[in-house]
Image (cartoon, grey):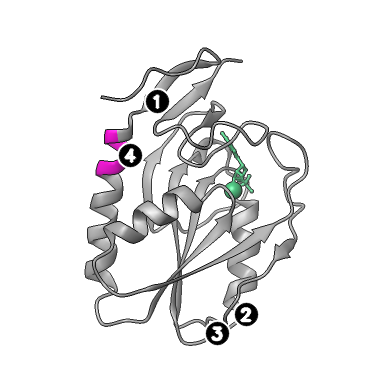
């Protein structure tokens, strides 16, 4: 049973059990596809930390993790297209099979920028794994290999996603009251 949503929330979109179930399924898919390969999960701070650690535990093969941070402008949705690496990876990714792990892909501008940047570092392969995918607001076409859920155009929090840096710790994904 999930805890009830806080009063600022309109409704729960996905329960903790639903999120955990999808992460287990995707973890199994990734384990099968990358067996015998040099897998690295790259998380985008801070939102993807919660999803990345859950996904990492659901993956049965050996793998590494690393993180980068991008600058974001504005308290809610970052200004589209204005992206800069604020904290780079600790290690090179040359020759590795890289999965870029995101909390949510919205316009796609952040992920497009990161894919372009990471592709220039000669990984063996590069793919995207996102918890949430809001395709209705996409501005640039993107290959999304793994995603837990597609969501409608509502602002959501929980499982790492924040509103003004709060609510990341909710175990479910909730729609904020407008
Ligand atoms: P985009 O795909 O470049 O538009 O940016 C996606 C980023 O915007 C995500 O990584 C989040 O940090 C943020 N974001 C977009 N939609 C939401 C939301 O509904 N809740 C919380 N953060 C969001
Ligand atoms: Mg993010």
Tell me which residue sits at (72%, 45%) in the image: 80
Quarter of the rendered structure image containing ligand 1: top right
Which mark is first along the chain, 4 or 1? 1
Tell me where the magenta segment starts and ends, as one range: 17-21
Q: Is-magenta flag for residue 93?
A: no
Q: In whole angstroms, how far apart are the C-alphas of marks 2 and 4? A: 33 Å
Determine contact: label 1, label 3, CB under 8 Å: no
Q: Quick one: quadrant of the C terminus?
A: top right
Please count the marks in the image. 4
Q: Is 161 positioned to the left or the right of 36 in the image?
A: right
Tell me which residue sits at (54%, 39%) in the image: 161
Residue 122 image label: 3
Tell me which residue sits at (49%, 36%) in the image: 169
Q: In whole angstroms, how far apart are the C-alphas of marks 1 and 3? A: 38 Å
Q: Position of residue 53 (x, y in %)?
A: 41, 55
Which mark is first along the chain, 1 or 2? 1
Q: Position of residue 151 (x, y in %)?
A: 44, 33
Residue 13 image label: 1
Q: Hey, which residue is sitting farthest bottom in the picture?
A: 95
Q: Is 93 positioned to the left or the right of 113 in the image?
A: left
Which mark is first along the chain, 4 or 2? 4
**Of the two numbered discs 1 and 3 in the rendering, the one whose residue sits closer to the viewer:** 1
Q: Is-magenta flag for residue 20?
A: yes
Determine contact: label 2, label 4, CB under 8 Å: no
Which residue in the protein does label 4 denote?
19
């Amino acid at each position: 049973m999930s805890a009830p949503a806080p009063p600022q929330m309109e409704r729960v979109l996905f329960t903790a059990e639903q999120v955990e179930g999808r992460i287990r399924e995707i973890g199994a898919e990734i384990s099968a596809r990358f067996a015998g390969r040099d897998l690295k999960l790259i998380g985008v701070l801070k939102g993807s930390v919660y999803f990345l650690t859950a996904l990492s535990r659901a993956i049965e093969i050996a793998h590494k993790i690393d993180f980068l941070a991008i600058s974001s402008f504005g308290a809610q949705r970052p200004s589209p297209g204005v992206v800069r690496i604020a904290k780079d990876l600790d290690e090179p990714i040359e020759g590795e099979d890289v999965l870029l792990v995101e909390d949510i892909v919205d316009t796609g501008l952040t992920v497009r920028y990161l894919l372009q940047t990471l592709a220039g570092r000669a990984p063996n392969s590069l793919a995207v794994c996102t918890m949430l995918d809001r395709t209705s607001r996409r501005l640039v076409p993107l290959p999304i290999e793994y995603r837990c859920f597609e969501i409608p155009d509502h602002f959501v929090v929980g499982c790492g996603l924040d509103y003004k840096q709060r609510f990341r710790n909710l175990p479910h994904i909730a729609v904020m009251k407008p």
